[in-house]
Amino acid sequence: MLQGWVIASISFAYLGVLFAIAYFGDKRADAGRSIIANPTIYALSLAVYCTTWTFYGSVGRAASTGIGFLPIYLGPTLMAGLWWFVMLKIIRISKANRITSIADFVSSRYGKSQLLGGLVTIIAVVGIIPYISLQLKAISNSFTILLHYPEIVMPARAEALPLLQDSALYIALILAAFTILFGTRHLDATERHEGMVAAIAFESIVKLIAFIAVGAFVTFGIYNGFGDIFDRAEAVPKLEALMTVPDTGASYGSWWSLTFLSMLSIMFLPRQFQISVVENVNERHLTRAIWLFPLYLLLINIFVLPIAVGGLLHFPDGSVDADTFVLTLPMAERQEALALLVYIGGLSAGTGMVIVETIALSTMVCNDLVMPVLLRWKALRLQEEHDLSGLLLSIRRWAIAVILLLGYVYFRAAGEAYALVGIGLISFAAVAQFAPAIIGGIYWKGGTRRGAMAGLTAGFAVWTYTLLLPSFAKSGWLSLDFISEGLFGIGLLKPQQLFGLSGLGEIPHSLFWSMLANIGCYVAFSLHRRPDVVEASQGTLFVDAFRNTESAAGSRFWRGSAQVHDLLPLIGRFLGPERARDAFLAYARRRGLASIDALEANADLVHFAETLLAGAIGGASARVMVASVVKEEPLGIDEVMNILDEASQVRAYSKQLEQKSRELEAATAGLRAANERLKELDRMKDDFMSTVTHELRTPLTSIRAFSEILFEDPKTDLTDRRKFLAIIVKETERLTRLINQVLDMAKIESGNAEWHTADVGLREIIEESIAATSSLFADKQVALDMALAGEVPMVRADRDRLIQVMLNLLSNAVKFCKEGAGRVTVRLGVDGSTVRVDVADNGPGISEADQHTIFEKFRQVGDTMTAKPQGTGLGLPISRQIIEHFGGRLWVKSGTGQGATFSFSLPMNREANEHHEERKAK
Amino acid sequence: MMKRSIVTGQRLVAAFLLGCVLFNYPLIALFNKPGEVFGIPLLYFYLFGAWALLIGLMVWAIERRKE
């Protein structure tokens, strides 16, 4: 036996934990370290969608309609796919305009109409109150049932209990106190409640765990898994029918309309709007919610059918209400702890919904119903009050208390008339009426206030007539004749078979007629008249929300004069003077101004003030209040249209301009690079010319000098004459060689050189080159060592060119060796996939710094001014060009005093080598 | 960035359209008959399978974006 006080204290302990989380969340938010700035928390808080209606009611619905409970969760899953566009747009619009409720959204879109905001608020309150009473009923029922543990007693009709003994009343009062503590601790200009969101996310985890625990217990504890439960169900014809839906058009129609209805609800239930839009910290969080939230729904639904079937099998006589199976099954099995967990899970589902829903409704009631009336009520002299923020808070607190008490009253009055799921769907159908005005409002500029008013009124009227009044009739408040005979006995007006439409369930029936009336009136009245100034400007702001990212977009439509010392006290009256001053100061700082006094009261500032105020009292009232302190010059509709056209043209032009300037920049960069390259080439050409002429002049000078001696002095003796002529011949040869090499270089560089490419064996080339230079070696008495690998693969190259390279390297080596003590080593070998040749000498070596320059044209190491140049300075550059032409590499390794090793490597020619191998094998 | 986000949006809308077909007449009528898969009623199995598939596609569309 569980004592009442045990259950009560556990409930309070749970609420205490919630409050601690919320308190912690608020503290962290104040410190700027938000705990809810996390996509997972955001997705979990969205699961406030799952109320006691899911927790207890899904099983009840599954027990009567089988798999028919699922569309309510499939719809949100589908809708999540559209969130990327639709929800993102709503969030962005709401943030830009400081929209704090669904009523505010609708009224802001359609010209900041107070009337429209009030209408939306009334529809929401009327539609949601039964839903709140449903939560009270579920919590109070579960409490009563648990109190009788281990006996299973269905709660008696609530009316039977005297008022003061009714647990539901206390639950309502406690929840009201709790919500007031949560939601109205202070007035926030953005209406965000970080602590509450953290608590809601926690509740989502609790209810999921509780439901999965009981599902697993029923499926695997009482029965032997899914297969066992469904096998047993098949044996009972009544249960077998639950596994399919009736194969009729109406049942498929009903299936689809429930899916559609839940798609709209997930967007437009006030609590969903509050959590997903108003409490959204960062729009990026939406991305994870798109899949995580549907996953949550999937998980919480897996065990619904097994629990329903298990309950029906367990209590075959129908003595136990299917809505309570989640709780009564563990109780029947004497699982005290599990039953308590389930109770807590149900409590978390109920409290979560009640807290968020009443906060959302209280914001609407305060901003869109009470404040507009109070502000118009001249006798109250509110215009003269200096600080209204306290008044705003107390209005919200009273609104919360009144809404919850209304929920309780409905609960007392409606009693047991309806199953849980029935009430939930009626609420869904009510909020679905917001869909045309909102979806139309963010995608269609032509929607007008009159259209939205007409659509909402018509849809709400049809909903009242086809769903709400019949539910009253079923509760006994109206005569049942109203349902069976129609209004005034007119058959065509039967509320659940309107105009003779029969065969649909009550929800699809009502959804069809109300949507027809709603959308029809919205479109027809919108098209009837052109939007006026404010409607057109707001319409553009909303529809083009993705384009108007700058917050100043709204100020385009305002012209007039204002004073900072009028605006600041106005905002201060609603937000509190200090917070208003802080906000203005922050705004001034963003503009680079030092103080509020420096602010200019231009259109931007007026817009800023109005948006700030909208966060506290709603867009429509903010409009009225701001208009009361500034002098406004009305804009004509044509002017607004011009501004809109201009703006869009300017946008298009500036886009084109940006594009053009980007192209221009790219072209300029390209030109600059090309110019640099040309300059570089020009400089290189000049260098080259001056070097070549210098190099040509040296031999020419000596040829000329000796020629002149021979010419002017005919008496020169023969030996001198021979000597001079030998020098002239040698210098001429050098000149020829130089010119040949310059031509050679030019050919190679310009790509006009002729290459006779063939398979070449490097060994032969080396041997041939050595033979050709042997006289050089002999003259200078330089020793030559050879270390040639026996068999090296062939390379693909020009034989004569390679000999040219080898000759160059060998003659260089000899040139730099000391006469008599020189030693040159030639090595040939395979290095990876290349064939490599080294020519090493023991000359003076080349310093690190010079190793790079020797491969530049006409650069010779050593002082060219004093020492006689030993070559043309073109040999190495040409050699390198040749080797690189065949895909190889030529480099030097040396250090001062350590000799120098010139190496080159060429890639092997695999194909030729294979041939070579084959031939050898034969 | 912008282009990629539009691609992701289109993938999600495609998932939405696929879901509309999967969860609707006539496809559900195909599975709306007595019978079992792994001991689980056919329609129940189909709906949860399609649901999981849809969530999988959404995960793919969203999380791939970060690459």
Image (tube, coloured by chain):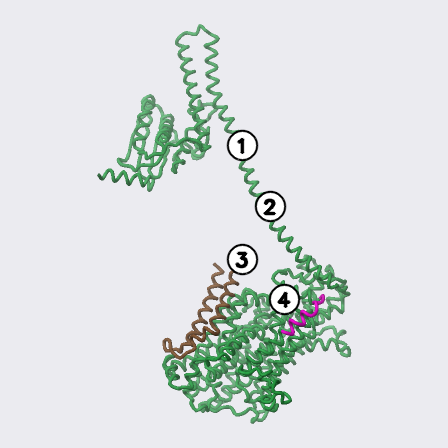
> Nearer the observer, disc 2 or disc 1?
2
N-term mark: 1 or 4:
4
Q: Which mark is residue A596?
A: none
Q: Which mark is residue A664?
A: 2
Q: Residues within 10 Å of mark 2 (few under 14, many from 20)?
A: few
Q: Which residues are magenta?
A: A520-533
Q: CA distance from mark 3 to mark 1?
A: 46 Å
Label 4, secondary structure: give it.
Answer: loop
Q: Which mark is residue A683?
A: 1
A685 shown above or below B39: above
Report the residue at 52% width, 63% height from top: B10
Report the residue at 48% width, 17% height from top: A701
Q: Are marks 2 and 3 on the same chain?
A: no
Q: What is the chain identity of the residue bearing mark 4?
A: A
Q: Are marks 2 and 4 on the same chain?
A: yes
The one nearer the camera, A482 or A445, is: A482
Residue at the disc numbered 4: A444
Q: What is the chain identity of the residue bearing mark 3?
A: B
Task: Look at label 3 and name its amino acid.
Answer: Lys
Asked if the magenta segment contains residue A17, the reply would be: no
Task: Look at label 2 and name its amino acid.
Answer: Leu
> Nearer the observer, disc 3 or disc 1?
3
Q: Residues within 10 Å of mark 4 (few under 14, many from 20)?
A: some
Residue A637: x percent and y percent? 73, 64
Residue A252: x percent and y percent? 49, 77
